Amino acid sequence: MKRIFDGLRVIDCASFIAAPAAATILSDFGADVIKIEPPSGDAFRQTWLASGQIESDANYPWIMDSRNKRSLALDLAGEAGRAILRRLVVGADVFITNYPAPVRRKLGFDYDTIAPMNPRLVYASFTGYGERGAEAEKPAFDTTAWWARSGLMGTVVSDGAAPPARSVGGMGDHPTSLAVLSGVLMALYRRLMTGEGALVTTSLLANGLWANGFQAQAALCGAKFHPRPPREKSANALGASYRCGDGRWLILAIHNEERQWPELARCLDRADLLDDTRFATRDDRLANAPALVAELDRAFAARERAHWRELLTARGVLFDIVALPDDIPGDRQLHDNDMLVRFADSDLLTVNSPFSISGETKTPPRSAPAIGQHTDEVLRELGCDAAEIARLRAGGVVA
């Protein structure tokens, strides 16, 4: 079956997480993605073992973000390894990297070195803080640049007195991978029009700022910010979260109050609230929001979440459950919309890339490669014979 990116060769010379995740999405649509990693393996392979990570017998980050790829284990510290990379670059369409600029220059795969080798190459450069300025070479993770520096961490707090919360693994990286992908796709379109490759740049900080765009734009307009009140003192009880009788949470998002407020009260068996003068109009409900939160707290605490979910759904009240990761495997909506898909070579499910295209079928996901699993295969495609491959392996250039 022909796919939209069949024949597109992508070099994934990246790690941790947004840049390689962009290559993963290209692979979902048929691109041949060659993962360049050192003979010891990409450091990202070890993320799941780090202190504080989710306890699992499976290398879940690698499984997701390296599916469909072919691994070439290549030592770029020496000239022989860099020569192999140059041979790959000449026949590639896209080169994606997030290695620090000094490392790129040292190992010979910075843009200025690579671009003349292949004028049609789309080179995607991903950084923490951007390509210019005093912090251009500052190391970053999504926790620091996307979450903290962008203003998100300081804004998304339970209340103004609460300490800021850490982001969870990959929380900024996976959304940011879509920016890397978008830049690559626009550059490929430009190449279609002009025949010329391009340098694509984006960063964790730029994407965190975009994610926090409402708040950032307000600040740019000179807005006055107020600390977020505690949930119990919410400014709008019909947009607050509530704990149900089984300890699980849901959140309301009622904007059409004229229709949905009476439905909510009746769902909760609290029709008496409709006659309470404190909550008679929208302005009354806003003025007395803490009192209404207290009433709704008592109501939701009377039954388990599944009960309320069924009633609220049937009544057309706008809400959703506050899901936990354990809820994901059994979420029927995710399965019905192919947000979760099964690997072609195992019974394991994985998270699908977040969009589809009419008339296009994605590549059935293949398991992430072992270190250097496809080294010989890729070298043969470059024209290396068995003797040359043996020499490269004996010299530690490949593994």
Image: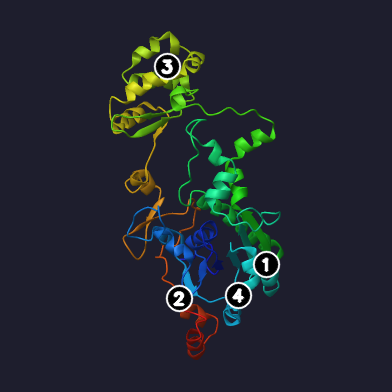
Q: Nearer the viewer, mark 4 or mark 3?
A: 3
Residue identifier under label 2 = 374
Vertical side of 222 occupied by 375: above or below = below
- Choose the circle earlier in sequence order: 4 or 3: 4
Circle 2 packing at 10 Å, graded few (<14), some (14-19), many (20+), is: some
Horizontal side of 359 relative to 90 (left or right) equals left
Q: Mark 1 points at which residue?
A: 111
**Label 4 or label 1, whichever comes before in sequence order:** 4
Residue, x 69% and y 35% (percent of image)? 220
Res 291 label = 3
Where residue 383 sits in the image (x, y, percent)?
55, 84
Taking depth in this image into account, of 154 and 303 the one nearest to the observer is 154
**Identity of the residue drawn at 43% across and 72% down:** 371
- Front: mark 3 or 1: 3
Within 10 angstroms of label 3, few (less than 14), some, or many (20 or more) residues? Answer: some
Q: Compared with residue 133, is residue 87 higher up or lower down, i.e. above or below?
A: below
| Residue type highlighted by circle 3 | Ala
Query: Considering the numbered disc 1 on the image, is that residue within a helix, a strand or a loop?
Result: helix
In front: label 4 or label 2 = 2
**Residue 137 shown left or right of residue 241 in the figure:** right
Hey, which quadrant is residue 91 in on the image? bottom right
Give x and y (percent) for residue 343. Answer: 37, 61
Kind of residue sitting beneath label 4: Gly
Kindly report the distance in space between the C-alpha atoms of the residues bearing marks 4 and 3: 67 Å
How many C-alpha atoms fall within 10 Å of the one at disc 4: few (<14), some, or many (≥20)?
Answer: some
Location of mark 4 (residue): 91
Quadrant of the image containing the N terminus: bottom left
Asked whether disc 4 touches disc 2, contact meaning CB atoms under 8 Å apart, the reply is: no
